[in-house]
Image (spheres, grey):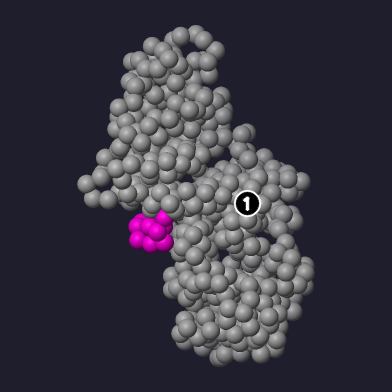
């Protein structure tokens, strides 16, 4: 019952999903992916290039990746490092990669990221833009309808050390085109203001829609901008936060202008910032409107906001680390009600799952990577709460030197889950533990689980080999060769995963993406099987 050895294509797929071939995802992404995916180099040939491009395309179409960065890096690496031959047969592979990159670069931020990786992964003495890259960038700008292009380039004006002006100049792009509307946008980006104002005086329907570029320019004026003036322009053009200069986001009028067009999730995510601006005090005129929206539980459910988003915002607001506002308990109660309502949107894994928890007694003094306003016990309780709500076949245990079963009902509040964990931290035996303990316990008691989730602050093991051997033994004993194991370590970056085990995954830290990562892993959405992936295409 041996587990299949992963192929190079499997390892590339795992890199795109998790940012590492080992299947170790960290909430703080690495500064560079260079040397993180050696398996990708085995596909740098005309014989195998199409194979990896096809796999990357499937991954993009299923959209199961956690972030796009590894996918963009992989495409850039192929383009930059594919060997050049006299027959130029490899040009077909590069063209396929560029075509995929056009689809993947949906936003201007994606474009900046791709250009950054193209530079980063280039061999020595190949730092400039070649003909293919110039053509790719030019096509990105000219393939979009002018109005869509205008909104996109004002949402992300720069990124990864690049601006639109840099790219246009590097590609020697002609800004005066047959489309006057596109010319307006390109001239705006290159700051040819005289030409911009001249074209904007042309009274045609298409160009009138681009008048908001002139108004956005006025918001960036070096002269002080009046808050009421900013609010009127934001309301008029329905501007989003990224289109608004950073210094204006410190004015309450800016959020007043955006409130009418913000989604429920955007409103909730903006609560900590609005609180620091005094917009959520009990005496504020904005408070009743915001609370009323959050209390609309039907809207919360229809918006399908993940409960982790509401929980993290609620904890950030309650912690009041800025000390700039007085907490509004009416708002907190509204957020608590929204959190409870959003639990209905959780997916179900539908298979037998073991959740094993351990936190140190001094966990309150530790801070979670990616969410430093949380102590480790809270994400453990939160994930337990999610799984209690969504799963019928769930076993919960706490482990240190021993493993103890915990019986909690689906309706138990978060506070009760926290209390249950805290009671174990007072045990003197809690200071010594090993991640292998719950696996040994499940093996000894012949308990068959399709999924085992270990939640802990620090990933302590006597040796990685012991952990990997214990997992192999468990699979053999319970006759589940594909049982999945995921270790979530909240406070350290130690790696304990097994690169050769595609059914093992590891996470360091916590943010709003982690619960979906855990569910997708246990549901098999990261299984690197081409046929299964193809069947999931939208």
Task: Locate residue 290 relative to residue 206 in the image: left or right.
Answer: right
Q: Which residue is mark 1?
A: 534
Q: Residue 42 colored magenta?
A: yes
Residue 38 at x, y = what percent?
Answer: 38, 62
Which segment did they paint magenta? Answer: 32-43
The residue drawn where x is 29% and y is 43% is 86
Q: Is residue 419 visible?
A: no
Q: Nearer the viewer, residue 284 or 322?
A: 322
Q: Position of residue 233 (x, y in %)?
A: 51, 25
Q: Position of residue 277 (x, y in %)?
A: 51, 44
Q: Position of residue 28 (x, y in %)?
A: 44, 60
Nearest the eye: 388 or 312: 388
| Lateral position of residue 212 relative to residue 306, left or right | left
* Vertical relation: 177 (above or below) 321: above
Q: Tell me which residue sits at (70%, 64%) in the image.
A: 349
Label tally: 1
Q: Is residue 76 above or below residue 442?
A: above
**Magenta run includes residue 124:** no
Residue 67 falls left or right of residue 260: left
Which image quadrant: the C terminus?
top right
């Amino acid at each position: 019952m041996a587990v299949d050895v992963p192929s190079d294509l499997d390892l590339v797929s795992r890199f795109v999903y998790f940012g590492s071939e080992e299947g170790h995802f960290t909430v703080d992404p690495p500064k560079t992916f260079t040397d993180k995916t050696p398996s990708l180099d085995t596909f740098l040939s005309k014989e195998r290039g199409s194979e990896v491009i096809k796999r990357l395309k499937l991954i993009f179409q299923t959209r199961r990746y956690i972030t796009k960065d590894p996918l963009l890096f992989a495409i850039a690496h192929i383009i930059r490092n594919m060997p050049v031959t006299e027959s130029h047969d490899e040009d077909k592979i590069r063209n396929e990669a560029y075509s995929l990159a056009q689809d993947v670069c949906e936003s201007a931020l994606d474009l900046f990221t791709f250009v950054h990786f193209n530079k980063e992964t280039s061999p020595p003495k190949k730092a400039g833009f070649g003909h293919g890259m110039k053509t790719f960038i030019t096509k990105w700008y000219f393939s979009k309808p002018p109005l869509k292009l205008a909104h996109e380039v004002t949402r992300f004006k720069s990124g990864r050390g690049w601006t639109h002006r840099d790219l246009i100049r590097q590609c020697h792009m002609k800004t005066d085109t047959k489309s006057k509307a596109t010319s307006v946008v390109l001239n705006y980006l290159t700051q040819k203001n005289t030409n911009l104002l001249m074209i904007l005086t042309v009274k045609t329907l298409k160009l009138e829609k681009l008048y908001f570029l002139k108004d956005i320019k006025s918001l960036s004026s070096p002269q002080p901008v009046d808050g009421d003036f900013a609010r009127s322009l934001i309301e008029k053009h329905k501007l989003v936060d990224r289109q608004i200069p950073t210094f204006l986001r410190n004015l309450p009028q800016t959020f007043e202008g955006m409130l009418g067009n913000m989604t429920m999730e955007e409103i909730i995510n903006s609560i900590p910032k609005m609180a620091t601006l005094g917009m959520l005090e009990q005496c504020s005129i904005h408070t009743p409107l915001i609370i009323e929206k959050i209390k609309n539980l039907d809207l919360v459910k229809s918006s399908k906001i993940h409960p982790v988003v509401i929980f993290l915002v609620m904890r950030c607001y309650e912690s009041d680390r800025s000390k700039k506002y007085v907490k509004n308990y009416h708002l907190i109660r509204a957020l608590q009600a929204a959190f409870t309502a959003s639990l209905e949107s959780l997916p179900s894994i539908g298979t037998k799952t073991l959740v094993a928890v351990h936190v140190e007694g001094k966990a309150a003094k530790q801070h979670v990577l990616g969410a430093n306003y949380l102590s480790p016990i809270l994400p453990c309780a939160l994930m337990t709460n999610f799984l209690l709500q969504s799963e019928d076949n769930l076993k919960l245990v706490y482990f240190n030197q021993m493993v103890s079963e915990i019986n909690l009902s689906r309706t138990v509040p978060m506070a009760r889950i926290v209390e249950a964990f805290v009671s174990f931290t007072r045990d003197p035996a809690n200071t010594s533990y090993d991640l292998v303990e719950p696996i040994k316990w499940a093996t000894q008691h012949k308990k068959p689980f399709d999924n085992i989730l270990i939640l802990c602050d620090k990933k302590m093991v006597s040796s990685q080999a012991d952990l990997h051997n214990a997992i192999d033994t468990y699979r053999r004993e319970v006759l589940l060769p594909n049982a999945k194991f995921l270790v979530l370590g909240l406070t350290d970056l130690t790696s304990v995963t097994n690169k050769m085990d595609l059914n093992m995954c590891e996470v360091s830290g916590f943010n709003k993406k982690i619960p979906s990562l855990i569910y997708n892993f246990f549901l098999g959405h990261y299984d690197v099987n081409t046929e299964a992936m193809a069947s999931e295409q939208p």
